[in-house]
Amino acid sequence: MASKRVEQIAAHLNYPRGMLAGQTAIITGSGQGIGAEAARLFANEGAKVVVSDIDGAKAQSVADQINQSGGQAIAVPGDMLDDKYLDTLVKKAAEFGNGKLHIIVNNAGYTWDGVIHKTTDKQWDTILALHNTQPFKLVRVAAPYFRVKDGEPRNVVNISSTSGLHGNAGQANYALAKAGVTGLTKTIAKEWGPQFGVRANTVAFGHIATRLTAAKEEGGYVTLPDGEKVALGIPQKQKGAKEAGAEAFKDIPLGRPGTATEAAGAILSIVSPLMSYVSGQTLSVTGGRNM
Ligand SMILES: NC(=O)c1ccc[n+]([C@@H]2O[C@H](COP(=O)([O-])OP(=O)(O)OC[C@H]3O[C@@H](n4cnc5c(N)ncnc54)[C@H](O)[C@@H]3O)[C@@H](O)[C@H]2O)c1
């Protein structure tokens, strides 16, 4: 009887902690917002997290906070639009994961809005590159770590938006790109599911409170490879009167925007073993909007 109890305790002590224990994850755009929260939640569940972001200081800060709270993370800063960075990112992630890589979350992104007749080729090409071409290339570079038969879980999550599922005036480029990721997701699920057990899913967000949806007047911006700055956020007049409170969110059944933590929770859920038979799907995380 006593030896049985000792065995139970030993098993408990040896049991890897957390739903993602033993797994290594790349989360792009995890220097802030939804990606940073996903990094924190993944680390809490035992994953080794590779914090990838163009903003090196923010990426390092997220990795430092995870390491200080007992998790494991490294920052690998760089620009998703740079092909060489994708090679570096996968190489460093695989080193960190002792030769293994289990999860990619293609989350890095921003909007660069314009009505159709005023959208420039540069606006169009940049948004498609960032949300479609580069995530595809990242998955392609990482293919040797996903096309393996070691019986361990493998997941790709591509982040989409209600703009991709339903269209949005002023966002032809972003809507096309965010619709595109669902096709990429399903193709990964069909190519790498049968032999390698890789799951691929899309998580589509509605209104999540981050820099991307903050007031444009707050002055957030991203810098393109050629140095041009793109302003982020939603102009206040388009956002609806903030003072109007719930009125401003009346098309959302839950009556409010989601938090970055809630958004990240959905990403964690879908890569977790609790969803081990879910693949090729699009999970809408919208507070019920667009039912
Ligand atoms: N916030 C929302 O309401 C919402 C809604 C639908 C979809 N999304 C999507 O969710 C994802 C995360 O957005 P968020 O709201 O957390 O925004 P955010 O601006 O808070 O975070 C995005 C992160 O991506 C990084 N990034 C941007 N361009 C990059 C590049 N070229 N290379 C590397 N990193 C880059 C940024 O530095 C930033 O840290 C995006 O794909 C966005 O399109 C957000």
Image: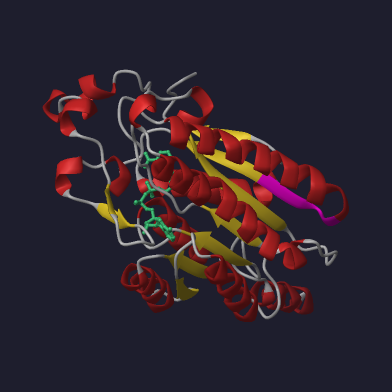
Residue 137, visible in the rendered structure: yes
Left or right, residue 256 beside residue 38: left
Residue 150 figure quarter: bottom right
Quadrant where the image shows the N terminus: bottom right
Residue 45, percent across and down? Answer: 54, 62
Residue at the spot 53% in from the left edge and 70% down from the top edge: 85
Front one among 85 and 261: 85
Q: Is residue 120 above or below residue 93?
A: above
Q: Residue furthest left?
A: 243
**Magenta region, main secondary structure:** strand
In percent of width and height, residue 75 lies at 45, 74
Residue 9, x across and y down, in percent = 67, 75
Judge by depth and name the residue closer to the eye, 72 or 200: 200
**Nearer to us in this view, 94 or 245:** 94
| Residue 90 position by quadrant | bottom right
**Residue 197 falls inside the magenta stretch:** yes
**Residue at the limit of the structure toward the right, as seen here:** 195
Give the answer, above or below, for where 237 lies relative to 222.
Answer: above
* Residue name at image x 33 percent, y 68 percent: 58
Residue 277 visible (yes or no): no
> What are the residue bounds of the magenta stretch?
196-200
Relative height, residue 285 to residue 9 (above, below) = above
Number of disc labels: 0
Q: Horizontal placement of 214 versus 19: left or right?
A: left
According to the image, what is the colour scheme of the structure?
A: secondary structure
The residue depicted at 67 percent of the width and 81 percent of the height is 98
**The magenta stretch spans residue 67:** no
Q: Residue at x 44, y 30 (%)?
A: 172
In this rendering, position of residue 250 left or right of residue 186: left
Which of the two residues, 121 or 32, is positioned nearer the viewer here? Answer: 121
Q: Quadrant of residue 279?
A: top right
- Residue 194: % across, % down: 86, 48
